[in-house]
Amino acid sequence: MYSVRMRAAKGDRHISGAERLVEEGDVSSSVQHLTERALAHERGKPDVITISVESVRTHVHRVPSLPIVLYPVENADAGKEAARKTLARLKIPGYCIEKAFSLLEDSPEVMRGAAIMDMEGNRLEPDRSRGVRATRMDITNDAAQDLANSLAARGLSRYYEQVKEALVLATKVASVRGTVAELCWSDDPSYTVGYVASKKMGYVRIPHMKREGNPRGGRVFFVDTMNLSEYIHELEKVPMLVDRFTGIQEDLTFRPLSQEEP
Ligand code: WAQ
Ligand code: MG
């Protein structure tokens, strides 16, 4: 298989990025698709688009996706509260949660990759302005079709592309030893959706994490004891294919919790 990666920038500004893991016959179509996407991105017209294609010779791990869990909220304030509660349930300390939120809310520039944060709130990624990017992951056509059908059944088809990419990324990140949880929301101004993902609770999808028009977003990987270089190696290098879609659940587990907590 081949790892195909795209990143687009305008000066120092990150515009967009994407990663694929495809068979040889699909390399050129994915290069074309990713180039077109970079050129049409709502964050701006890039002046540099970098596409790299690398053969992958190591064993490709096949894993089922995290389940999607819908956490319906009406606005960004409720969404942020939902994310904080979910992270707290996953035992992420409060000060780490607050630090992660201010990183994603207040940084003047979005990062190209993710921050890695330990349980003391320390940032571990070697390059703090760049972050680390999870790469070498994708989803099989069959699993993607199941996801598409499942979204269609809930009237969520228009989000298919974003959900697919984010679910693949979150599944990979959650599968890396040391990850406790991930917090994410989009940096696309018109896309307000975010999630908290973890092996324990799945991909908790939150429709509003910011107001429309806000160009800030990002990702924080919360980690517990692990070896940093092994962790980054696994994120970047170990290839992973989601070969089964696990399904979408409603938010039944959340309501009692939000009632019992202040
Ligand atoms: N590895 C690490 N961090 C990444 C990666 C990656 N491969 N790709 C993006 N990021 C970081 C980077 O800081 C971006 O600025 C930020 O995440 C947001 O990326 O409807 O669209 O591609 O269920 O804008 C989630 C909800 C959407 C999807 C996430 O992210 C849904 C999204 P974006
Ligand atoms: Mg984006």
Image: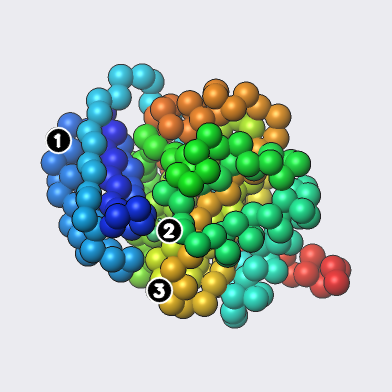
Image quadrant holding the N terminus, namely top left
The disc, 1 or 2, on the residue closer to the chain's N-terminal end is 1
Q: Is residue 42 left or right of residue 242?
A: left
Q: Is residue 184 left or right of residue 17?
A: right
The residue identified by callout 2 is 163
Between 67 and 217, the one lying in front of the other is 217
Among the two numbered marks 3 and 1 on one chain, the one whose residue lies closer to the N terminus: 1
- Secondary structure beneath disc 3? loop
- Indicate which quadrant contains ligand 2: bottom left
* Res 103 quadrant in image: bottom right
Count neighbours of disc 2 (C-alpha within 10 A) and say few if under 14, some if 14 to 19, many if 20 or more.
many
In x, y percent, where is residue 226? 65, 27
Residue at which label 3 appears: 190
Question: Residue 101 appears at what percent x and percent y?
Answer: 64, 60
Frontmost residue, 65 versus 78: 78
Q: Which residue is pictured at 51% across the width and 30% down the height?
A: 232
Q: Would residue 49 appear left or right of 228 to someone viewing this image?
A: left
Q: Describe the element under mark 1 as helix, strand or loop.
A: helix
Q: Determine which residue is flagged by label 1.
A: 25
Q: Name the amino acid type tagged 2.
A: Val
Between the residue at mark 2 and the residue at mark 3, the CA separation in whole angstroms equals 15 Å
Where does the image place residue 88, in percent across and percent down from the top left?
A: 76, 55
Q: CA distance from mark 3 to mark 1?
A: 34 Å
* Image spot of residue 177 (x, y percent): 60, 30
